[in-house]
Amino acid sequence: MESIQKSIVRIWGTSSITGGGFLVSEDYVVTCAHVIITAVPTNIDKALVVNVDFPFLAPLLIIRGKIQEFYPSKDDGSGDIALIKLIDPLPRGAIIPRFASVKKIWGHNFRSFGFPKNYKNGVYVSGKILGTDAAGWLQIEDIKETGFFLEPGFSGCPIWDEDQKAIIGMAVAVSNEKSKKVGFALTIDTISIILSSIKIETSISSEMFMVEDLPKDYIPRKKISEQILECILTRNNSKQTIGLIGPGGYGKTLLARAVCHDYRVVQEFVDGVFWITLGQNPDLIKSIEKLKFLLSGNTGHIVDIETATFELSRMLKNNRIFLVIDDVWRESDIKPFMQGGDNCVRLITTRNRSLISSIADKIIHVGAMTKDEAVALLSISLTSLDSNHLMILSKKLGRWPLLLKLVNATIREHINYGNKTILQALTYVNSSLEKKGLIAFDEHNSEDRSRAVQKTIGLSLAQLTDLENMRLLELSIYPPEQDIPLGTIFRLWKTTSGLDETECDEILLKFFRLSLIAHLDYEQNNVRIHDVIQEILSYQAKSILTKVHEQYLLSFQIDDWSKLDITEEYMWRWLGYHLIAAKRTEEFRDLVKNISFLAKKTFINGVYLALKDIEYISNHYPDDQILREELNSYRNCMHLLANLNRQKDIHNTIRNRFVGIRKLLLESDNLVGPYWETDELYPDSPHNALIRTIRGHEGEIYSCDIAFDGNSIITASSDKTIRLWDSSSGEQLRKFSGHTDDISCCCITPNNKLLFSGSFDGSLISWDVKTGLPLHTFLGHSSEILACITDPKSEYLISCSMDGLIKIWNITSGDCLYTLSGHEDAVNGCCVSDKSNLLISVSRDNTVRIWNLYSWDALATLRGHTDWVNDCKVTLDGEKIITASRDTTIRVWDIQDDFKCVAKFVGHTKNIQACNVDSRSERIVSASWDKTVRVWDIRSRKQIMCLYGHDHWVNDCMFDTSGQLVFSVSDDRSIKIWDLNTVENPSQVTETESVGTCAIANQSPLIVYSGVNGSITVVDIFKKDRVCFKGHTKIVNKCIFSLDDTKIISASNDCNLGVWDVSTTQLIYLYSGHKAEVTCCDIDDQGIVASCSVDKSIILWDSNNGMTLHELIGHTDVVRCCCYSKDKKWILSGSDDKSLRLWRREQNKVIIENIYNHKSAVWSCCFDSVGQKLLVAGMRDGSIAIWDLEISSKPRLYWKGHNDGVSGCVFSDDGKYIITIAGDGAIKMWDVKDGKCLLEEYVDGQVFACDIRQDILVVGGKRGLYNFKIIY
């Protein structure tokens, strides 16, 4: 509070104190406007003198001040701020206090010091900070213990946050009634904007204000600024988008920045003012990650645009945010920023009128400056000039800010460095422009504008020497509107002209003086060129650009770009750009095929930009099969790479995920051990036909349809939305909301203008595709809608329902025209054939029914399926009907042969939910709850492809219009796109079962593992031969080999443990001593098994005869894990009771030796492998602990190692490393000495078990068994 005491002032009226204020800089005090009005009841102007004093430092020593800024209170809650500039010097000891933002201050304590009536020396008040209200005011509540309340005398006084130890606001609104304990304050964030607007440097900052300062020579454009502010501030608390449209160089960006700095905007948008610049080459992912960090503090990487869009939409929800999206060139770039945020206002600047007209609620054209504004800009740093001369010149320049700034810079250059008078410089400029033919131009004509820029730039170029002019042209090799590091320019100019850094600096300063570069920042060490100027320079330099790019690349003197230093951030971002511009495209192709380069690129620039490099070069070389497979492999592991923050981990993951093509790629750098590698595809690897996964829905996806032009797809989800996606890029184009329950089906008309949806809420809705607005609601079914289609002429909507009925609706009016009954259970789906004028329906009564398409008469009932029939389609030639059933078969019915079943396709192992047929009537695609999509040949009646990759039930599928792509949707909330032209990898992973436990044999090359069905499998590591053991009726939680590898011991949820003969696969003995599920087991060299259970016990029993030897009681909750020490003298157990217990074996008894307590349930444990007397525990909260066996008071090491429960841990054979696995799919290696993570990799899905023998590591997880070789 000392800084309050030494900064607080009293505001004096004629005879009394009217309120307080506080110091914000060496000569400025802030207070409330109404305090000033009370003190000086006269007209307020900047000549008015106000008296203040510092009560703690020099009471009654009056210090005079003048009103600098004055904003009286308004009805909308804004204003009530006054800024006083002190005339007299400060008293000794006065200090400027610390200020802090009001973000996340809910529940903090505050103190304040004010001057209520009869307390001229002031009193303290304290209380709670309640947060900010809907208008952006800080709401505070005093507490009675101090004896004082918030009263009018506190107006203008600082609010001190006891938790942040800083001033966070100024008391403004308080009550005369002491019973009302609540007061309001103006936030320091708002005050800081007013201070910055008049260039007062203070320590005030706000982490939620993300906008650059205005330039010192900024000329306010009051009229258009107020127009923009009116749009922003009159939004009625609703979502709104405002567009600033205009040619380049007319000041859109500066106007947007200016309104951000208006205190009313900061006061209105209490959750932040944010700025994103896109430009011609935007890094969309990086921009959204930046917003994500500011809004949530989360630094996690985002994989793709779809995920980024969803993440940003989620973060904007319920936040009052002002978001500027500057310099937008393409509609696809802006879309990720347009989702969600019902309380947000977006301000978009662009030159693209068609783009902004489709997304903005209000559009403001930014054109020429007003006469006064243009004269003010033209006369910066110039004095004694006749404004009439400047007005004539500004008119000649079209009052275009860019040209005005260029000409102003030229005039100043002639005066400061050319020894001309102002009049001579002005005469020179006018004469030169007239010689170049610039008399006037049409600002709306792009060719006119371009000529005007070229002619005006000519004035600036005339001030340059030949050497300087060439250096300027060389700058055009850099991408437009990017921050270019100074070191990058120094490197280029040293190569092209031998300049040293001092000479480079002098040239850059001259360019900046002449406004040829828009930004020169020696703190950030970068330069930025306005894209309008760069476009002109690029045109002038087009004959030398290739050469200059080549010279720039040669300046690095590097043969292998994968060895480029990681500090060269600019070059890692733009290396491909420069290589292609230098006509070195093949070199770039080879570089992208280099695993070391790709790993480093991913580490430095992130997965999104690395993917863009692969996509670009793959499109350039469409026949390069290796690039195509690399692209698919990278896409399929991007989400896993995004979890990694170290180059080694990324490199290791890419090597393993590229195993199918690894030998065909380059690798400049060898990984340094320890690391692991595999020589086989991971069990979670999707089929190599998978080319894209689209995410965005927040619930299961039940249905999809494709537009007839093939450019977009629609999906229906349990999240109650239908979404329209670009089928090429995967971008979400539109979201349709209106249903009140899960949406089960959707379809689109052939002209792509209307789409229809059906829901479990019993309704169907028609939607305008272009606007996203609902047109009609169709009501009539008495239960959930299961399917909907339109007839070929788009006259009727046909719906199927759980009520057993089919209804025919008029698309235009929404009237129900016909109701078809006949099915004896829910109708799951229907389809139509215009060739044969048939409507086909399928039902849970196991039948297929045929109806006349336009008379609606029932024609036939087809039987043959033995369970629900879920879907049906008719071939395009109108000859065959395809049906899919829960009986796991697809049937083909011949329409011309009296609907006879002519084929049955078998292959799926679970319910087939959907089917479709290609446009040539040659192939069928089917979607099943076995998580696969399968493609079948109708003529040969054989399965062509089985596509794996979904993590849950697949609900719908369809071909694109070419028949080469398949789209599928799933309960895993994803849309997947498959390319059927892909050549199947001969080592392609087939469907694998979830593996809950695994172990390696002690002496033989065998692995034992078990899945969810209770069966146990033994596989030879080298021969890959498999043997299956069956006997358990429920999940097996643990299986291990005996020390001589002749037996397997298994622990199951069926409450039993099995003893199996490895050679015969026969069950030798079934032990049933536990009263509940058995969670874990281990065996010693005498065949004594230690097993633990949900029944809270650990039992020791003899596997040779099944005899129970000891029951260890002590744990108070489920015992999750147990194991023997290497010498078999100790038993370790871990439990949900948060303890790790050590048991000592003595002859015929077992004694509890130590209890090691933790903060979370212990899910896994192990002894060290070489007798170091170390114990490891893995916890449910992701923590890992290493204990000394003999010390239970404190662990040797304890750290948070995972983001999910640690489901397994094991020491390496040499005892130097620990491997841990977790439910988040992470596999990590740690150094035992210091707990340092040496390597980590993520797999798709949870992992449950792990084991090591020598250099072999096996991991069992949801997607199968992973085999690794550890390289030490």
Image (tube, rainbow, N blue to C red):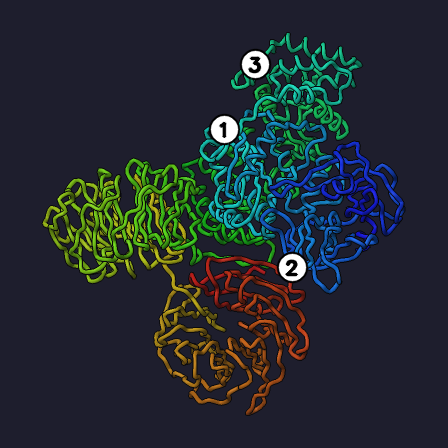
Residue visible at 54% across and 59% down?
676
Could you tell me the amino acid type at mark 1? Asn
Which numbered disc, 3 or 2, marks the residue closer to the eye?
2
Q: Does residue 836 lie above or below 411 as drawn? A: below
Could you tell me the amino acid type at mark 2? Gly
Q: Earlier in the sequence, mark 1 or mark 3?
A: 1
Q: Looking at the rendering, in which quadrant would you find the N terminus? A: bottom right
Residue visible at 53% across and 75% down?
1136
**Few, some or many residues within 10 Å of mark 1 (<14, 14–19, 20+):** some
Q: How many numbered circles does the render carry?
A: 3
Q: Read off the residue under disc 2.
A: 107
Q: Secondary structure at mark 3?
A: loop
Front one among 416 and 648: 416
Front one among 1191 and 739: 739
Left/right placement of residue 654 relative to residue 384 reads left
Give me the C-alpha separation between circle 3 and circle 2.
60 Å
The reply to whether the C-beta atoms of the residues labelled 2 and 1 are less than 8 Å apart is no
Which numbered disc, 2 or 1, marks the residue closer to the eye?
2
Q: Secondary structure at mark 1?
A: loop
Q: Earlier in the sequence, mark 2 or mark 1?
A: 2
Q: Secondary structure at mark 2?
A: loop
Left/right placement of residue 913 relative to residue 410 reads left
Q: Quadrant of residue 408?
A: top right
Q: Position of residue 1114 (x, y in %)?
A: 55, 84
**Few, some or many residues within 10 Å of mark 2 (<14, 14–19, 20+):** few
Res. 441 mark: 3
Could you tell me the amino acid type at mark 3? Phe
**Few, some or many residues within 10 Å of mark 3 (<14, 14–19, 20+):** some
Q: Does residue 807 lie above or below 1055 as drawn? A: above
Q: Read off the residue under disc 1.
A: 352
Q: Is residue 591 visible?
A: no
Residue visible at 23% across and 60% down?
868
